[in-house]
Amino acid sequence: MEPIRIEPLEKILNSAIDDESRLPRYLYGPVPSRRLGLSLGISPIPKKTCNYSCIYCQLGRTDHLTNTRQMFFPVEDIVRELDQFLKSPVAFDVVTIVGEGEPTLYLGLGHLIRLIRLRTEKPIAIITNGALLYDRDVQDELMAADIVLPSLDAVDEDQFRRIHRPHRRLTFSQVFQGLVEFSHRTTGRLWLEVMLMAGVNDDDETLNRLKSMLDMVRYDRLYLNTPVRPPAEPWVRPLEHEQMERAVDRLGGISIDLLASEGFYSAIADPVDAIKSIIKRHPMNQYEISDFLSARGFENPDEVLARLNQDEAIVVIDYKGYHTYRLK
């Protein structure tokens, strides 16, 4: 019997790479997730297309604010790229639909989940802001996922508008009631996340009201987060460790800064293009980039960082004493 030949992953993905950018169009990673392990990301949404423009978003301000679900890309094109990836030996723990905007805006979401299910036994996770959970069609589509990870960051309309800067058609009560309803309908796992920011939603009154609201939601896990990457607005500040401990004491759950994650991965040979394929959806700081390059056997990270610094498509942000890289 002849030995089985495994094509280099760069060659396998070549046919699934957009001709113009030479970067994968829909898939990225696997990337490290402190909640999910090694996450193979799928982005069915155009860049910065969302129904929120959150003050803490690591991708920056939303360019295309919409609350209308659309078939942005053909489901078949996304699945074709996934099929190419699954021919490779690259390990991952979960398929995560999230990407560059709000994934529930993708009108083909339910069909996409079903087709992924036919191709892998790995769990399917959806990271969502939860804004469309009031829509029964969205609820029904998400029922097919293994894990849904929505957010709950505000306790009233004023906070909702200050933190999320949502589409004008959305209201706080509508969004929260949608979350409560979905949490009691779904048979999958619901992992809720609260993003806390100093001076915005970390005061005692807000935490007490959050506690009461959490009692209305049926969730399997609660994660408390705070901005660890540069937020959309420079005035947004993360919680100090003591503040986060106080929030954990009040709300329960798990502080996400206590979780560890593995390294980043890309199949693209050129180090700059590989990094750009990741930071399109998941910003990286200079230390993560150096570790990423070391894992690939690259001995001169300063050369790559210099290329990144000169790339007009990349914005470099000085945040918390180090540089973070994301696409404009």
Image (cartoon, rainbow, N blue to C red):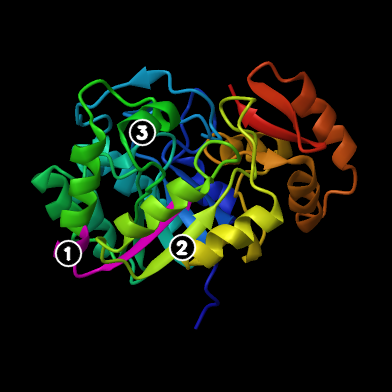
Task: Name the residue type under label 2.
Answer: Leu
Q: Which is more N-terminal, label 3 or label 2? A: 3
User: For mark 2, what is the residue?
Assistant: 251
User: For mark 1, what is the residue?
Assistant: 184
Question: Quadrant of residue 327 in the image?
Answer: top right
Q: Position of residue 129 (x, y in %)?
A: 35, 43
Question: Quadrant of residue 43 in the image?
Answer: top left
Quadrant of the frame with the C terminus: top right
Decide: few, some or many residues near mark 2? Use Cα within 10 Å; few <14, some 14-19, many ≥20. Answer: many
Task: Using the numbered discs, state the Cα–Cα distance from disc 2 to disc 3 in whole angstroms.
Answer: 19 Å
Task: Residue at 39% x, 33% y: name it.
Answer: 159
SS for tag 2? helix
Task: Residue at 90% x, 43% y: name it.
Answer: 300
User: For mark 3, what is the residue?
Assistant: 160
Decide: few, some or many residues near mark 3? Use Cα within 10 Å; few <14, some 14-19, many ≥20. Answer: many
In the rendered structure, are the residues bearing label 1 and label 3 in contact, judged by CB atoms less than 8 Å apart?
A: no
Say which mark, if any, is on residue 5: none
Task: Residue at 55% x, 77% y: name it.
Answer: 3
Q: Position of residue 261 (x, y in %)?
A: 63, 63
Q: Which residues are magenta?
A: 183-194
Q: Which is more N-terminal, label 1 or label 2? A: 1
Task: Using the numbered discs, state the Cα–Cα distance from disc 1 to disc 3 in whole angstroms.
Answer: 23 Å
Question: Quadrant of residue 169 in the image?
Answer: top left
Q: Position of residue 96 (x, y in %)?
A: 40, 54
